Amino acid sequence: MDLDQVLLDEIAALPAESGALDYRYGESVAELEQDSEVVKVRFASGAVADFDLVIGADGLNSAMREQVFGPRAQYAEYLGAYIGFFTIPTPAAMMLETGWVGVYPMPGSVLAVRPDPEPATSMAIISTRVPVDDRLRGNVAAQQQLIRDRLSGHGWVVPEILDTMADSPDFYFDEVARIRMPKWSQGRVVLLGDAAYCGSPMTGMGTALALIGAYLLAGEIATTPDDFERALTRYEELLRPLVTAVQKGTEAQVRLRHPVTRRGIAFMHGLVTVVTSRPLQPVRALLTHLFGKGAEYPIPTFPGDVVG
């Protein structure tokens, strides 16, 4: 929500001559039909409108991708784990500063608690390695029961989090999955962000890739407004090397972050303790620079009158 408001504020500050924007919150695309000149969109409300270009940025389980490019199963790769996020009252035992995360590894599962800017609440992040189970899709009761089954009996703040999970206002749960597509556009429809190239939450790059992708896509469209085919081709040419680098090795990341043996858990505890210790902050910064995926990605610039 914070990022959403930042972007809305920036758009609202644009000069009036930059063109009006039509916001339709609570709306979704029911179906679309395109030809070489236009994309006709029918919304869930029944409204119909024509557009020069349609950009689908509707996430891992993209309905736009399903409509235009084919079934999810063609592009989604399950990486061996599920992950849940939800807001909780900050546990009484938490003594973390903003910007730090508490991590508690268990056999095959990991609980992380990240303080919010508002001290009264925190974000619980729970991931667990289990075989894929289609019965979990859209079934919140089954999702929360899986979390209880995997975490019950463990210490730290686990009992408190399990007790408050059902009352969370923003419970989210899904597969740790990767989206790999041979092409991100078809005609006048193009995908952006997780809909096109989700690397999974394990990469920590979802928002960054979406914003970089949006910038490149906007820049290329503005540079060649009369040649969408060229713009969409350039967008993909520029971004795909970074996406490929980010997506590489995510299966290994899932295994590393979810040890199943006592020795593995002990190693995880030690690694987290060492890496997050204050004396090693300069070393951590160096490692981020050396091994951070995308750290050396040269983001192109566009003329100021194209993308400000």
Image: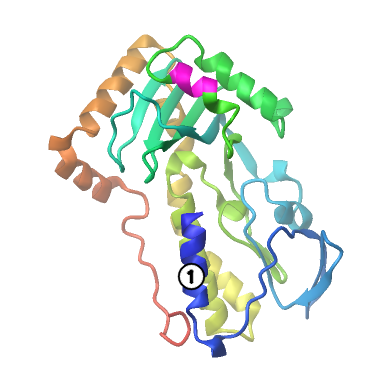
Query: Is residue 26 in view?
Result: yes
**Near-viewer residue (17 or 263):** 17
Classify 235 as above or below 84: below
Quadrant housing residue 140: top right
Q: Position of residue 71 (x, y in %)?
A: 76, 46
Classify 75 as above or below 267: below
Could you tell me the amino acid type at mark 1? Asp
Query: Is residue 243 in view?
Result: no
Q: Position of residue 305 (x, y in %)?
A: 45, 88
* Residue found farthest to the left: 279
Q: Residue at x 38, y 36 (%)?
A: 114
Classify 149 as above or below 272: above
* Residue found farthest to the right: 46
**Near-viewer residue (7 or 301):** 7
Which SS does the magenta portion mostly show?
helix
Q: Residue at x 52, y 60 (%)?
A: 4
Residue on which disc 1 sits: 9
Quadrant housing residue 168: top right
The span picked out in magenta is 158-163
Q: Residue at x 58, y 14 (%)?
A: 149
Q: Residue at x 42, y 45 (%)?
A: 204
The answer to whether residue 124 is magenta is: no
Position of the C terminus, as image quadrant, is bottom left
For mark 1, give the secondary structure. Answer: helix
Task: Classify residue 130 as left or right of residue 285.
Answer: right
